[in-house]
Amino acid sequence: MEGEKKRAVVLVSGGVDSTTVLAIAKSQGYEMYSLSFSYGQRHAVELAAAEGVSKYFGAREHLVMNIALDKIGGSALTSPIDVPKCRPREHSADGIPITYVPARNTIFLSFALAWAEVLGARDIFIGVNALDYSGYPDCRPEFIEAFEKMANLATKAGVQGTTKITIQAPLQHMTKAEIITAGVSLGVDFGMTHSCYDPLPGGKPCGQCDSCILRAKGFYEAGIKDPAL
Amino acid sequence: MEGEKKRAVVLVSGGVDSTTVLAIAKSQGYEMYSLSFSYGQRHAVELAAAEGVSKYFGAREHLVMNIALDKIGGSALTSPIDVPKCRPREHSADGIPITYVPARNTIFLSFALAWAEVLGARDIFIGVNALDYSGYPDCRPEFIEAFEKMANLATKAGVQGTTKITIQAPLQHMTKAEIITAGVSLGVDFGMTHSCYDPLPGGKPCGQCDSCILRAKGFYEAGIKDPAL
């Protein structure tokens, strides 16, 4: 692909983190292929945000995969369990919020890996971060590292030893406030993003779930008004 | 789950290998949850075989996930590329057959991981084998090992350190003939299985694709007549 732009697959949910990641990938000169999932989430309104920010940042293509994770269940995001309100990180006995979706990032990254291999993309971007995160095991740096190792054995790259796949997690060590500040400096309009796990009728954020609270805290600490509110 | 049978998720395509794996898991006393995929494969007839063998071996549940890998493409199994006939392992310039589906086993195992976590199953069975295999990178022992490591960091197991997930690949070092012999001794009726990548109208095997040829070679070397023919 000499002379062509380097390609990247970017996982985009339409929230604060993945939208900032799109802006970062663009600023690094990648031709972006954004990937989202309709997975039975109760906040499927986020897919409209994912489409909007993908277009805004000029992604070459935006692919939405339909995978009915609600058939597997195990999460407040995909099952008829109430999303906890006003008590972040305190609701589950094992310390992991019940909004955790089993193996979700593994599944998302696996599809990204397939698409990257078909596109000849060497980089996969994901907006996980390990500071202001929700306590999900698949947001930790050691998970990302292990996935990258596995990915290079799973694909042609591992046999031919030519194109190494890299999992890019540029937000890994940033606070939510730092992410928001970085996003604004790269031209993100956070008014286009959606974070709420359990939106009100019409799609407005509830303001009380883990995700809304993390977002509000981030904007507050960044000293920026949330344009989505 | 004291007093209950130990649970396993078994990846079942309805072919020779995965059906033998079902029989092995049953012989080891597992309560089996079989998992298949409708992924845009041209040989979707295999799903009927997967359903049949899952019932035959008493799987507690058989879940079929719909994931349109044909939207990602890159394989003769999911794209309008001809499946090569009568020239196994010689068709692709890079030594990997064009029937390779990018990251397929990674994706399949990721869903199995999600389901295992929800079920409290510690074991995931997969019928990969590294001897009479088709040259796919994601059938190699080093891939399975890397996936297992990643899986234990991806899930609650990795945070709590209690239930370690094991990827069981009991066929890994067996020839196709050994697999068939083992299957027969465990009560597999291979007449219920389907292997062909590119079935004739009505679902009969073509007899000429990689998968048909590997199957025929296996039965020949095992000295057993293929009951599906």
Image: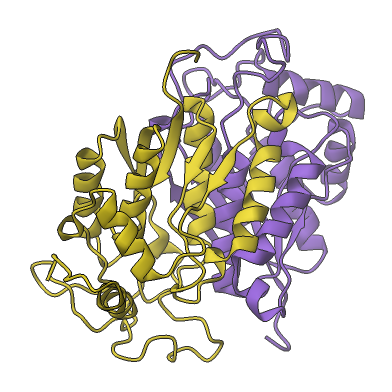
Chain colours: A yellow, B purple
The answer to whether residue B126 is seen in the rendering is yes
Left or right of B29? Residue B8 is left
Seen in the picture, residue A74 relative to B188 is either above or below; the reply is: below
Seen in the picture, residue B81 relative to A99 is either above or below; the reply is: above
Residue A120 placement (x, y as % from top left): 51, 25
Of residue B148 and residue A137, the one placed in the foreground of this image is A137
User: Within the image, what quadrant is residue A192 found in?
Assistant: bottom left
Residue lying farthest left?
A202
Seen in the picture, residue B213 relative to A175 is either above or below; the reply is: above
User: Within the image, what quadrant is residue B135 found in?
Assistant: top right
Q: Name the residue located 22 percent from the left edge and 45 percent from the top edge.
A: A51
Of residue B103 and residue A160, the one placed in the foreground of this image is A160
Left or right of A28? Residue A135 is right
The answer to whether residue B34 is seen in the rendering is no
Residue A61 placement (x, y as % from top left): 30, 32
Q: Name the residue located 26 percent from the left edge and 50 percent from the top edge.
A: A50
Left or right of A216? Residue B20 is right
Numbered marks: total:
0
Residue A69 placement (x, y as % from top left): 41, 60
State the quadrant of the C terminus of chain A: bottom left
Q: Name the residue located 27 percent from the left edge and 76 percent from the top edge.
A: A212
Residue B66 placement (x, y as % from top left): 42, 46
Q: Name the residue located 64 percent from the left edge and 9 percent from the top edge.
A: B85
Left or right of B203? Residue A188 is left
Of residue B199 and residue A109, the one placed in the foreground of this image is A109
